[in-house]
Amino acid sequence: MSEAAIVLKDIKKVYKKSDKGAPETEALKGISLTIPQGEFFALLGPNGAGKSTLISILSGLVHKTSGEAYINGISIDKDHDRAKTYIGVVPQEINLNIFEKVIDIVIDQAGYYGIPRKQAIERAEVVLKDLGLWEKRNDKSQALSGGMKRRLLIARALMHEPKILLLDEPTAGVDVELRRGMWKFLRELNEKGTTIILTTHYLEEAEQLARHVAIISKGSIVADESMKTLLSRNKDKKLEDIFLEMTSEQP
Ligand code: ADP
Ligand code: MG
């Protein structure tokens, strides 16, 4: 039997007090989740719920305070470098070198994973064409529109053909038509076998795409079930109402 794509056990994260006097924040209060291979999983939650913190722990940008995390069965504490080879990460913040050309951005990325240059060039053509960026390959990233930059982040994340793709609010600031194009792309990628984990605060996005949804609120998981079950358990309600009930402040 193959390993789950992602296993999280009681993950906690406390951001320490900053020098500037910001208070200590308990961003994750014990998150446990198991995401099987091939899943299309949405992590849904309002701003500040802890979604990016969770993604950043898996990608290695943030150190967890406690708990265990496994990517494709490999503990991130034991061998994060190897664990990371299985994931592609699309960060919430656009972190592209604005002076670098589109083609160089994706080819350099392949270099980090030890992919030979000739193979990287071939792969770049495939991913850039898939994401509608091939015509832009010789433009500097600063010349791209917001939606194109987001697509370039996806192209970059896919260069090493990861089994698991983590996307942190990939459609933030992307207009409706382009958002639908991105949904189609992600659906097809999932159908071809890539496990997709997507954070979003757009309910419609989660509903359209995900087979499984976890709702996170103030650092805790408040729902973790198939989208079908969640919706049928709350028969007369829309996802929006369920979400608001589960994430609102209780007096
Ligand atoms: P989300 O992605 O769901 O909007 P985040 O993971 O970004 O949530 O944030 C969760 C909580 O942790 C928030 O209260 C946020 O202010 C805090 N936080 C996030 N990053 C940092 C940081 N680098 N230092 C201190 N606090 C942080
Ligand atoms: Mg975030």
Image (cartoon, rainbow, N blue to C red):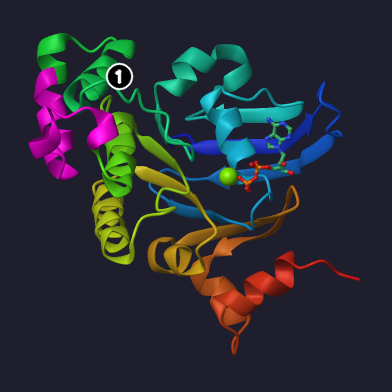
Q: The C terminus is located in which quarter?
A: bottom right
Residue 245: percent from left, percent from top: 72, 74
Residue 222: percent from left, percent from top: 72, 60
Compared across the picture, whether 54 is left or right of 167 comes to right
Compared across the picture, whether 18 is left or right of 204 comes to right
Tell me what residue is drawn at x 60 percent, y 13 percent: 78
Residue 90: percent from left, percent from top: 41, 37
Residue on which disc 1 sits? 109
Q: Residue most toward the bottom?
A: 236
Q: Residue most toward the right?
A: 251
Q: Quadrant of ligand 2?
A: top right
Q: Is residue 7 above or below residue 110?
A: below
Q: Amino acid at mark 1?
A: Gln
Compared across the picture, whether 184 is left or right of 40 comes to left
Local secondary structure at mark 1? helix
State the extent of the magenta-drawn residues as a range. 121-143
Dot 1 alpha-carbon crowd within 10 angstroms: few under 14, some 14 to 19, many 20 or more:
some
Which of the two residues, 33 or 106, is positioned nearer the viewer here?
Answer: 106
